[in-house]
């Protein structure tokens, strides 16, 4: 009998969600996010070893970010309604959903560059060997991911991906 043990890795992707605060300029916004964690078969990435195909996450992000409902409870409700379809889409890719969370961005910060405000989110991920990676995501004010910095904390290797 053949042992069908798959090499799996968990990866979390964070999407920021901006709420404009009434009576203030557009640059003053409150940041929230929703965090999607999946477990999938490992796909080799020469530098980081943690590249996972997350097709479908962007569709969910788009639906959430376009919603007019701004409270955390309402966004969480929209997420719950979308997760069932997302699970089916992921199953076709042999990817399983671990969890979806709506969280306040305590680990985020704002970066001002060229008079533009960027939202910076710092997360961590592990590869199958247990190496810890620092993942820094940079988003513009339209919630588009524009840059990803990956750093292997054990080996000290860094990779920057610009979109």
Image (spheres, rainbow, N blue to C red):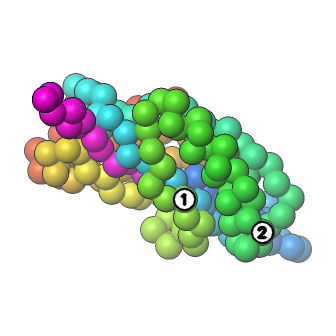
Say above or below: 20 vs 43.
Answer: below
Residue under circle 2?
74
| Rendered image quadrant of residue 101 | bottom right
Camera-side residue: 116 or 93? 93
Asked where in the image residue 34 lies, by quadrant, the reply is bottom right
Quarter the N terminus occupies: top left
Image point 79% across, 60% down: which residue? 26
Label 1 belongs to which residue? Answer: 100
123 left or right, relative to 99? left
Q: Secondary structure at mark 1?
A: strand
Q: Do we see residue 140 in this rendering? A: no
Extreme residue in the front direction: 1
Marks 1 and 2, the one that precedes in the sequence: 2
Asked if disc 1 and disc 2 are in contact, CB closer than 8 Å, the reply is: no
For the residue pair 15 and 163, the one nearer the viewer reads as: 15
Q: Is residue 73 left or right of residue 98?
A: right
Which residue range is magenta in the image? 1-13
Residue 63 position in % (x across, y down): 75, 46
Give the SS element for disc 2: helix
In percent of the image, x 15 and y 33: which residue is there? 3
Using the image, determine if residue 23 lies above or below residue 84.
Answer: below
Q: Is residue 16 left or right of residue 156?
A: right
Residue 55 screen position, x and y as percent: 55, 32
Q: Say above or below: 93 vs 78.
A: above
| Residue 133 on the magenta span | no
Answer few, some or many: residues within 10 Å of disc 1's Cα (few below 14, many 20 plus, some between 14 and 19). some
């Amino acid at each position: 009998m053949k042992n069908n043990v798959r090499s799996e890795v968990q990866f979390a992707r964070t999407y920021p969600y901006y709420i404009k605060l009434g009576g203030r300029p557009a640059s003053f916004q409150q940041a929230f996010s929703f965090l999607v964690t999946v477990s999938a078969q490992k796909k080799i990435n020469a530098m980081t070893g943690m590249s996972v195909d997350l097709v479908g996450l962007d569709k969910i992000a788009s639906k959430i970010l376009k919603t007019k409902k701004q409270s955390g409870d309402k966004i969480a409700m929209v997420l719950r309604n979308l997760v069932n379809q997302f699970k089916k889409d992921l199953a076709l890719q042999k990817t399983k959903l671990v969890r979806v969370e709506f969280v306040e961005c305590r680990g985020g910060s704002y970066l001002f560059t060229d008079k533009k405000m960027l939202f910076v989110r710092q997360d961590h991920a592990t590869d199958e060997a247990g190496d810890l990676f620092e993942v820094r995501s940079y988003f513009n004010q339209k919630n588009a991911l524009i840059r990803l910095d990956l750093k292997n904390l054990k080996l000290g290797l860094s990779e920057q991906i610009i979109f």
